Amino acid sequence: MAKRRTLKKAINEMSADLLLELLATKQANPNISDADIENIALSIVTLQDDFICRISHVDKHQVKRFFAQLQDDLSVGTNEIVDHIYHLL
């Protein structure tokens, strides 16, 4: 199991990368509405906050299952956000 601090740092970096990708998409295509950009940015920040909170409250009896589920949920959430970003184009 990785340290919680390391996991939180990785989630923060992933969120920053998603936000940068979103801003690059907006800059490349100025016709995208600001409301769409704001909604996706809000979903990125919400995803980040949710996973940081989840890491802080680990069930000590089911650690392996907890982190396996966390990884699956993070993958699904990230893929959904990436799909939303690319559907803006």
Image: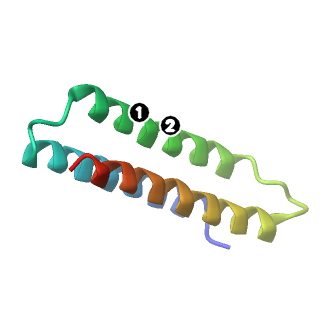
Q: Amino acid at mark 2?
A: Thr
Label of residue 46 in the image: 2
In the figure, is residue 60 to the left or right of 26?
right
Proximity of marks 1 and 2: CB atoms separated by less than 8 Å: yes
In the figure, is residue 40 to the left or right of 51?
left
Q: Which x, y percent locates residue 59?
A: 84, 54
**In terms of image quadrants, where is residue 1?**
bottom right
Label of residue 42 in the image: 1
Along the viewing direction, whichever of 37 and 52 lies nearer the viewer: 37
Real-space Cα distance between discs 1 and 2?
Answer: 6 Å
In the figure, is residue 87 to the left or right of 57?
left
Give the SS element for disc 2: helix
Q: Is 43 placed above or below 70 here? A: above
In the figure, is residue 20 to the left or right of 7?
left
Q: Tell me the residue at 30%/50% (across/down).
A: 87
Q: Amino acid at mark 1?
A: Leu
